Image (cartoon, rainbow, N blue to C red):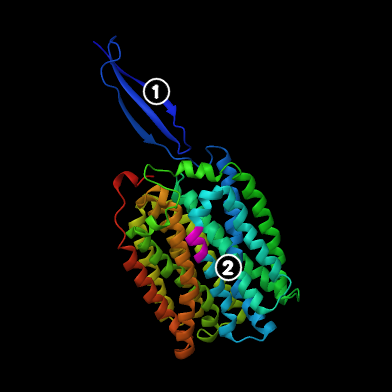
Amino acid sequence: MATSTTVIEMAALPSSKDHILFLQTPIRGNSELPGPVASHIVETKQTWNSPRINTYRLAAIYFAFVNFGMNDGSYGALIPYIEADYGLSYTVTSLVFLSPFAGYTFAALFSDHLHRFGGRRGIAILAPLCKIIAYVVIATNPPYPAVVTILALAGVGNGLLDAAWNAWIGTLDHTNQLLGLLHGCYGLGATISPLIATAMVTKGHLGWWKFEYIMIGVVTLEICGGTWAFWKETGLKYRDDNSTADSDEKGKTRLALKQRVTWICATFLLAYVGTEVSLGGWIVTFMIRIRHGQPFASGMTATGFWLGITIGRVTLGFITPKIGERLAVAIYIICSLGLELLFWLVPQFIVSAVAIALVGFFIGPLFPSTVIMATKLLPQELHVAAIGFAAAVGGGGAAVLPFAVGAVANARGVQTLQPIVLALLAVLLGIWLLLPRIPKHLHES
């Protein structure tokens, strides 16, 4: 009886997209190669350790996101001392939140152009360099207008790395887990920096600007590690990897903005980041004034919130792909709604402290899951432009929504924080359900 075997020839394509060309030719018995040869392309993704350089790239990116979280987490701890040092009103002091948003906007508009010009190597150099310049200026304790102005440059750096590294990890295998760890690193940085900054000012009796010395040191390590890891990722290589038959040199931002998915993800991140920052920024005041907690214990509730986010991003990142991003995030938001309602209606300090930590746990995976949805629903050549735009809009939520919460709190009292956050979580659920379903063949990618 004749047997049937298959000859498989594999050839690496001339780009780094890691496609493998399989030429399959059936052989029946001892016959020669028959008629037409069936060929097809099977896409295989790079992994965290293949090629080996990816291991070092991930380490550099994770360290960069710890620094990113340290930057963002330090604002809340240092604002009271900035306000006292310069003799500012709350409104003027709050410009430190608005200024980085200008930088984020620039990063969103020009991220794809910068990628095409300098590649990921250029981003690994330019993004931390912008932050180092900003930190060096702030470390001299300059006049307040200079602080506000230079923070926009730090926003450029953080916006560029936010878009670039989210998009790159989104192309790897096991994206959920890797992005969960990435944003867990952000949460880790946001957790430790308030503790360090507060200890330096209150225990070490140092000026608030001395904290920037630490940031200069860690970002110097970031630029060295990132540049080495991405040295071969040039602009030419990026253009080759992301070229299509009808592409041109103008980038993909305009094309990305024509996609409905881009706008849904951007709106979702605006509401999500705004909710996250509003909770993290106002929870201490709420616990002191409404739950009548001690200052130190109330401060620890903010740490618990950020720890919840960190743990949620890491652990739920392994569960989300088994459920599916669309369903999993809907479940996480519903759980957060229930916990937020418990926080609001049960006026006990311990219950509130546990509830806010669990809220952080369940909303933690929302940002990385949004990035994954974007990478699955959009063409690869639009990933950087679309994710960069969505991340920048999310940065706008971090600037605008906390101010809206503060304005209402000033007029109605800080107890309005909880119903506002509850409403924002309901809005998040509604926006999320507008996303189309992921095609079945992408569920395991």
Tell me residue 180's x, y (percent).
48, 55
Residue that numbered label 1 is attached to: 9
Q: Write the residue at 66% across / 75% down.
A: 146
Q: Image quadrant of residue 244?
A: top left
The residues bearing labels 1 and 2 have C-alpha atoms spaced at a distance of 51 Å
> In the rendered structure, which segment of residues is drawn in magenta?
105-110
Instruction: Give the class, few, some or many, for how many residues have Cα within 10 Å of label 1's Cα (few <14, many ≥20).
Output: few
The label shown at residue 72 is 2
Quick check: can you spot residue 301?
Answer: no
Tell me residue 250's x, y (percent).
44, 52
97 up-or-down from 156: above or below? below
Q: Write the residue at 44% across / 77% down.
A: 343
The kind of secondary structure element at disc 1 is strand
Predominant secondary structure, magenta span = helix
Looking at this view, is 104 or 279 the one in front?
104
Quadrant of the image for the N terminus? top left
Q: In this view, does 244 lie to the left or right of 230?
A: left
